[in-house]
């Protein structure tokens, strides 16, 4: 869902964001409220308080930490979307990862009295929130990272009950001793101890309403139970051990603190969690009410009726040699689906819509140029075919149909499903407060949702989580075909493109900062530049290996990245272990991928489609008056003669076939010989469709097979092959070769 701020709130644009105003000092910099067009939501923009040139070594550590945080995914950690250099300062963009729960503002704090002290239920909730935050800290420490700036404002509760640890990457990691005999520890013990102490301070303040003293000594910080008698002694002991050093009886790491909090709240594991039968019955009733909403069946019938009926009419029109009618019906279907996708995505969001928005609005200049070129080529093709006016009119009709369905069906369905999803969300929120981990919560929703578990699970967790549990429980075949196979492939394709774009951007920033760091360490300029060009790809290689689930060298992600900085060749040896012949082959493959990539196939396919439509229009293969005969024949039902209509349509089909056989090459003033060679048979249209369909895949086998098929369809008749044989061979190449290669590989 896109939540657009009021225009009056947008004073400036920085880092591709609409900055709404300052939040205040945060760590070593300043945070701003901002709105991201690519995310369609509010984000936090943090800008370092020091310029990178003032201390390049510190700036490099801060950027490397942000780079690592951008690869971390945890249900209780905020998402670091990107980092970049903004005006010579490091900037970081972060979002919680979901809608924030609306809370009543706290009453103003008095100088003499503490804020309202929590009651028993609030104490239980505060401990449950602390447990989720502790799990987030545990995930950070396991990766060799630390927070360094945990405060009450760092814990953000989402609408689904999850507690998110935000404010990541605001404090530079401690300096690394690169010359020491032992490699530096990740995380640094002092940073680890600081996170534990800060977590204890936050929990103390949540339970008592007052800030603790500088030390856990009772003379400085009264025990929480002395301020709030509802605080159990076990919780007070955890707070004290979080703040005490390990030598004085405190926790030596976050893991035992998490275990102790889980014991206090009685948190079960996924294996030992046995929900009460009334809990299961309640959730199952919510799933049934959500799936059986009255408008859900109506929506399904309307969708199947419209697309099925329109598709059947288009097929019938093709069989009856009514190409303009078939093209108009197909255009109406596609435009209705496109407008429904846009309207639904703007109002409710969606996995594919969110990725497309991020790809388009958060893209580079060449990505935006590709989208613009695709639109221009499509409009030129319709103009050349003489169909631009009718297609615009059909587009307006499609937009109206999509809007009517959204207003009359989807809005009504959302209202009917609001109560069951809110009650189910409240139930799952209670499970999270009682210590159940996020994977266990999702397992409960899958295992105890009954036969109708799917729609409610989709509403609560989204399509990505739904596809992730596809192996755990059988899905209905329409969902498996549409959501897992089709939408899953589209989502993976977009993820790959977004990941490549992110890696390229990160490599540019890291390479520049590494060069500045090396020069600050008095490394000669040319040597620093050469080494930075190796360090950047080495960091990217280690991050990709981490995202693939490979165990990082050094024991955790931070240590692996630090090792890549010290010795980039060791990180690149597995990636670039090649001979000169292998290097030549790799460069040739890279060039081939560039020339046959999805962007090239999309633009070439649209250009061929535009030329084919112009050729068909010049040869009167797309007449505008085709449906008039049917209309004229149907005006007088009492005189309706089906045999006469059939003979008329047969005559029309034979006429079109004769015109196609006598079709002349495309006549144009620009490059007439080339265009006449390309556009003289219907093979150009088939080649366009093959290239457009293949542009959804980045696979090399699909690219080569589709290009070969397009060449056969275009030039097969010129080489003496029969037209029908060349078209069939092109289809076989496009469909069979990628499947055979995939099976062999």
Image (tube, grey):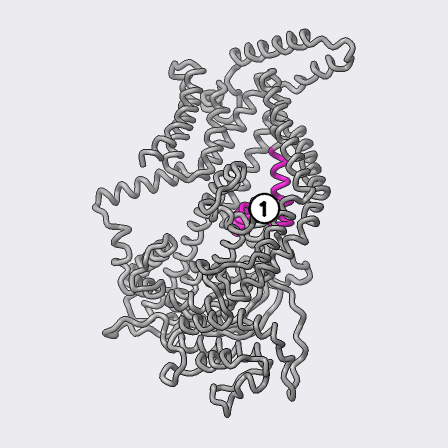
Q: Residue at x 42, y 16 (%)?
A: 725
The span shown in magenta is 334-362
Task: Determine the residue located farthest toward the bottom in the rendered image.
Answer: 219
Q: How many residues crowd around disc 1 within 10 Å: few (fewer than 14), some, or many (20 or more)?
A: some
Q: Quadrant of residue 252?
A: bottom left
Residue 59 to residue 339: above or below: below
Q: Quadrant of residue 20?
A: bottom right
Q: Which residue is mark 1?
A: 455
User: Residue, x 36% and y 84% (percent of image)?
Assistant: 247
Q: Is residue 11 above or below residue 677?
A: below
User: Residue 425 at x, y = what percent?
Assistant: 60, 57
Please tell me whether residue 533 belongs to the stretch shown in magenta. Answer: no
Residue 47 appears in view: no
| Image coords of residue 292 (percent x, y) | 65, 44
**SS assignment at label 1:** helix
Give the total number of marks visible in the rendering: 1
Q: Can residue 374 be seen by looking at this rendering?
A: yes
Spot the residue most to the front: 277
Which residue is painted at 67% across and 35% down in the image? 302
Give the image location of residue 109, x and y in percent: 65, 81
Horizontally, is 239 left or right of 512 in the view? right
Residue 495 horizontal/vertical position (percent): 46, 48
Q: Nearer the viewer, residue 577 or 122?
A: 122
> What residue do we see at 74% from left, 10% from top?
640
């Amino acid at each position: 869902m896109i939540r657009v701020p009021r225009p009056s709130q947008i004073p400036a644009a920085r880092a591709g964001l609409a900055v709404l105003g300052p939040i205040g000092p945060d760590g070593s910099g300043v945070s701003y409220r901002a709105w991201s067009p690519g995310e369609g939501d509010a984000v936090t923009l943090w800008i370092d308080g020091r310029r990178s040139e003032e201390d390049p070594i510190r700036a490099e550590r801060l950027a490397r930490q942000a780079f690592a945080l951008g690869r971390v995914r945890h249900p209780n950690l905020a998402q670091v979307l990107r980092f970049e250099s903004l005006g010579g300062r490091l900037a970081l963009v972060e979002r919680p990862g979901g809608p924030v729960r609306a809370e009543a503002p706290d009453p103003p704090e008095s100088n003499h009295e503490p804020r309202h002290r929590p009651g028993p239920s609030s104490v239980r909730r505060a401990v449950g929130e602390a447990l989720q935050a502790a799990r987030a800290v545990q995930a950070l420490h396991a990766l060799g990272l630390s927070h360094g700036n945990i405060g009450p404002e760092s814990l953000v509760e989402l609408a689904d009950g999850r507690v998110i640890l935000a404010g990541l990457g605001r404090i530079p990691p401690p300096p690394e001793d690169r010359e020491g005999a032992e490699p530096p520890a990740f995380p640094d013990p002092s940073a680890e101890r600081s996170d534990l102490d800060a977590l204890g301070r936050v929990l103390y303040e949540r339970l008592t309403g007052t800030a603790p003293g500088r030390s856990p000594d009772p003379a400085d910080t009264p025990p929480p139970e002395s301020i709030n008698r509802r605080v159990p002694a076990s919780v007070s002991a955890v707070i004290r051990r979080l703040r005490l050093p390990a030598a004085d009886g405190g926790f030596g790491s976050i893991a035992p603190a998490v275990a102790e909090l889980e014991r206090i709240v009685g948190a079960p594991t996924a294996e030992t969690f046995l929900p009460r039968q009334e809990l299961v019955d309640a959730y199952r009733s919510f799933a049934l009410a959500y799936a059986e909403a009255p408008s859900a069946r109506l929506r399904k019938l309307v969708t199947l009726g419209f697309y099925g009926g329109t598709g059947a009419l288009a097929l019938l029109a093709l069989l009856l040699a009514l190409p303009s009618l078939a093209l108009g019906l197909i255009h109406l279907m596609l435009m209705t689906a496109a407008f429904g996708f846009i309207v639904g995505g703007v109002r409710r969001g969606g996995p594919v819509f969110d990725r497309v928005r991020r790809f388009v609005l958060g893209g580079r200049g060449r990505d935006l140029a590709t989208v613009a070129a695709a639109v221009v080529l499509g409009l030129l093709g319709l103009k050349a075919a003489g169909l631009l006016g009718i297609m615009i009119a059909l587009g307006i009709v499609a937009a109206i149909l999509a809007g009517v369905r959204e207003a009359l069906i989807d809005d009504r369905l959302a209202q009917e499903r609001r109560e069951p999803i809110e009650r189910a969300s409240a139930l799952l929120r209670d499970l999270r407060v009682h210590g159940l981990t996020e994977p266990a919560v999702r397992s409960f929703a899958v295992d105890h949702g009954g036969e109708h578990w799917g729609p409610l699970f989709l509403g609560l967790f989204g399509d990505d989580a739904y596809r992730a549990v596809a192996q755990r429980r059988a899905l209905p075949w329409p969902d498996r075909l549409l959501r897992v196979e089709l939408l899953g492939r589209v989502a993976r394709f977009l993820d790959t493109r977004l990941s490549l774009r992110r890696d390229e951007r990160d490599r540019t920033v890291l390479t520049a900062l590494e060069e500045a760091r090396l020069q600050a360490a008095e490394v000669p300029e040319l040597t620093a530049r050469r080494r930075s060009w190796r360090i950047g790809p080495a960091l990217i290689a280690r991050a990709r290996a981490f995202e693939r689930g490979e165990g990082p060298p050094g024991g955790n992600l931070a240590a692996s990245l630090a090792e890549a900085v010290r010795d980039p060749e060791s990180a690149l040896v597995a990636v670039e272990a090649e001979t000169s012949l292998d290097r030549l082959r790799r460069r040739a493959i890279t060039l081939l991928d560039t020339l046959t990539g999805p962007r090239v196939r999309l633009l070439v396919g649209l250009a061929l489609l535009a030329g084919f439509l112009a050729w068909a229009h010049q040869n009167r293969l797309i007449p505008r008056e085709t449906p008039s005969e049917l209309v004229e024949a149907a005006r007088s039902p009492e005189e309706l003669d089906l045999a006469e209509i059939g003979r008329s349509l047969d005559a029309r089909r034979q006429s079109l076939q004769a015109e196609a056989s006598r079709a002349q090459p495309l006549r144009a003033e620009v490059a007439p010989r080339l265009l006449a060679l390309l556009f003289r048979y219907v093979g150009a249209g088939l080649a366009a469709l093959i290239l457009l369909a293949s542009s959804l895949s980045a696979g090399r086998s699909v690219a080569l097979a589709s290009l070969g098929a397009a060449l056969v369809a275009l030039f097969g008749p010129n080489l003496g092959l029969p037209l029908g044989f060349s078209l069939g061979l092109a289809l076989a190449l496009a469909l069979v070769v990628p499947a055979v290669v995939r099976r062999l590989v």
